[in-house]
Image (cartoon, rainbow, N blue to C red):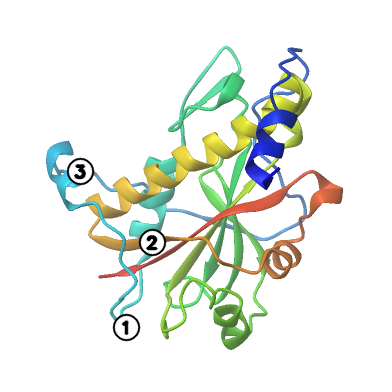
Amino acid sequence: MNPFERFYLDTQIFNFTLLPNSLPKKYGNVKKIPLPTPIEINVSFQEVMKRRHSSRAFRRERINLNKISSLLWYSVGVKEIENGIQFRMFPSAGNLAETEVYLISLYTDLEKGVYHYDPVEGSLDVLSNDLDEELMLQAIKNSLPDITFVPLIILLTSLYWKPMVKYGNRGARFSLIDTGIVIENFYLVATALGLGISAIGGFNDDFFNKLIGVGMEKGEVVIGMLVVGEE
């Protein structure tokens, strides 16, 4: 039996409870960087769909904070709060919004470092400013053997315990589906902003889990990765 068959069989059971909530992860006692108001994007949906593609050749130009703020808000921000319920820019199973977003800034208006996006406050949590860029690129060489310059890495993690508590083993499927939806949001918004973007599959899981302080024992793991830059 191949790994997919085993995963498919193990996640067929569907349970339902009402325990988890949709609140994003919060960091206490860390420096916060407020993000500027997202810019208005005046590009037609048709044009965005036609232009959307994967790009791994980036100019040596810093990504400015306005673009970073807009990329984050239009992709995964909180668009409204109604009766205490947060509605995000992406759908998710049970509105649990279990996908979390981390940034690794290598050549942007931000200092080099690792950041977590707080969608409620519209800010970035500063997790670390200690980065080894060469080691970072080495950890994604399986998918990008010839890449030499990456301005921004976006890590998508899943608080996978949320959908699994609510839906049983089938929640594991939902966490992967939800991450995929967020990846496409980032693709479309990056295209509208004139940024190049590419999803990365072959990265070193342990390296990036340790870098941002997550892991199976904490119920949160890195599921997806995107590289972003000026095209």
What residue sits 62% from the left and 35% below the top?
Answer: 175
Circle 2 SS class: strand
Q: Amino acid at mark 1?
A: Arg
Can see residue 76?
A: no
Q: Is residue 115 above or below residue 136?
A: above
* Mark 2 surroundings within 10 Å by alpha-carbon count, few (fewer than 14), some (14 through 19), many (20 or more): many
What residue sits 76% from the left and 34% below the top?
Answer: 161
Q: Amino acid at mark 2?
A: Ser
* Mark 1 surroundings within 10 Å by alpha-carbon count, few (fewer than 14), some (14 through 19), many (20 or more): few
Q: Which residue is mark 3?
A: 49
Q: Amino acid at mark 3?
A: Met
Which callout, 1 or 3, points at the residue further toward the start of the chain?
3
Q: Residue furthest right?
A: 217
What residue sits 25% from the left and 70% below the top?
Answer: 231
Q: Nearer the viewer, residue 52 or 19?
A: 52
Q: Of discs 1 and 2, which sits in the foreground? A: 2
Q: Nearer the viewer, residue 132 or 42?
A: 132
Q: Which residue is mark 1?
A: 60
Which callout, 3 or 2, points at the residue further toward the start of the chain?
3
The label on residue 198 is 2
Where does the image place residue 76, in percent across and percent down from the top left? 47, 40
Q: Nearer the viewer, residue 146 or 35?
A: 146
Circle 1 SS class: loop
